[in-house]
Amino acid sequence: MLTLTRAHGTEPEDLHIGRRAAVTMFFAGYAVAALAADATPIHTPDDGLIVEAALIPNGAPKPLPAYVARPKGTGRHATIIVVNEIFGIHDYIKDICRRLAKLGYVAVAPDFFYRSGVNLPAISDFKQIMPIVAQASDDQVDGDVKATSAWIKKQSFARPDRIGITGFCWGGAVVWRAAMVDPDIRAGVAWYGHVEKLIMRAGEVHSPVLGLYGGQDQGISQDSLAAMTKALTMTGKTGSSIHVYPDAGHGFHADYRSSYNEADAKDGWARMLAHFKANGVV
């Protein structure tokens, strides 16, 4: 089982100096707007891994940047697309990628907000962050997800038929939509992503999704989760389900935030891995 160590921030050796693209393309540190003063975030070293930046063709004037972590050596691996929260690609998302890579996955975290040209993790005011996030339309983001899976299928280190997706908060909703619109996605795990606008589209879910939610989440109602569960059942999507942790709030997996719930985060992580394994993303 993967053993994770803890640290208060990223150390210089986390990303090798020789990999300058990966160092300079993404924010070094945790999202300023949400970092708890007393946080002790999980730190996963990159020994045994290749950590690099990629530029993914997506039809835009500038290609989609992505943070990639994968096991060293030859061979093809199942791949997980990792979708960030509203803060973009910062140390928490990068660490998620390294955790998955330590388990034998290729992990790819696209920077869905790159078109704004703004370094989102460095912004401390939520009121400045939200308008930037709103510029990334559903259609645009869904297109970027499909471009990412298409790129993955062409890589010599990836199994083209074993692509999964997981995402947190804003990224959780992206996961639900990806399971509807991207035929290359084999399974998804959505961490506390809004479902209100997606309930009527439950019948479009073609890949099984596991939703992980907090019973104390003040932004996502239990009624909406119940309605989504009913809609999935009514449309025969028996492979998809929603699990609610009664004592957890929003962001319970985010170990750099005050909302972190260690027990539920660990259980959710185990459920995520089991869901991917059960659906052939392994």
Image: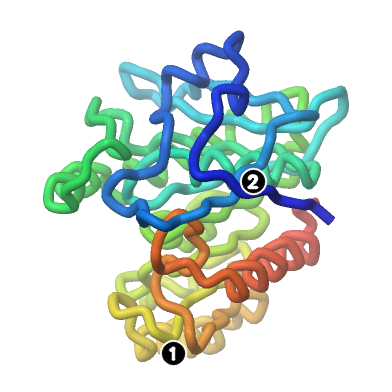
User: With 185 as the anchor, is 85 left or right in this view?
Assistant: left
- Residue name at image x 36 percent, y 79 percent: 217
Q: Position of residue 165 (x, y in %)?
A: 58, 52
Q: Position of residue 216 (x, y in %)?
A: 39, 84
The answer, for residue 177, to whether it is visible in the render is no
* Placement of 165 over or under 160, stated as above or below: below
Dot label at residue 80: 2
The amino acid at mark 1 is Ala
Dot label at residue 226: 1
Instruction: Specify the color scheme.
Output: rainbow
Which class describes the residues within 10 Å of circle 1: few (<14), some (14-19), or many (20+)?
A: few
* Placement of 177 over or under 69, stated as above or below: below
Q: Residue furthest front?
A: 38
> Mark 2: which secondary structure?
strand
Question: In the depicted view, which residue is nearer to us: 221 or 97?
Answer: 97
Q: Position of residue 172 (x, y in %)?
A: 45, 61
Question: In the depicted view, which residue is nearer to us: 72 or 242?
Answer: 72
User: With 144 as the anchor, is 205 left or right in this view?
Assistant: right
In space, the residues marked 1 and 2 are separated at their CA atoms by: 27 Å
> Mark 1: which secondary structure?
helix
Which class describes the residues within 10 Å of circle 2: few (<14), some (14-19), or many (20+)?
A: many
Q: Position of residue 264 (x, y in %)?
A: 59, 75
The amino acid at mark 2 is Ile
Q: Indicate which disc, 1 or 2, sits on the residue closer to the N terminus.
A: 2
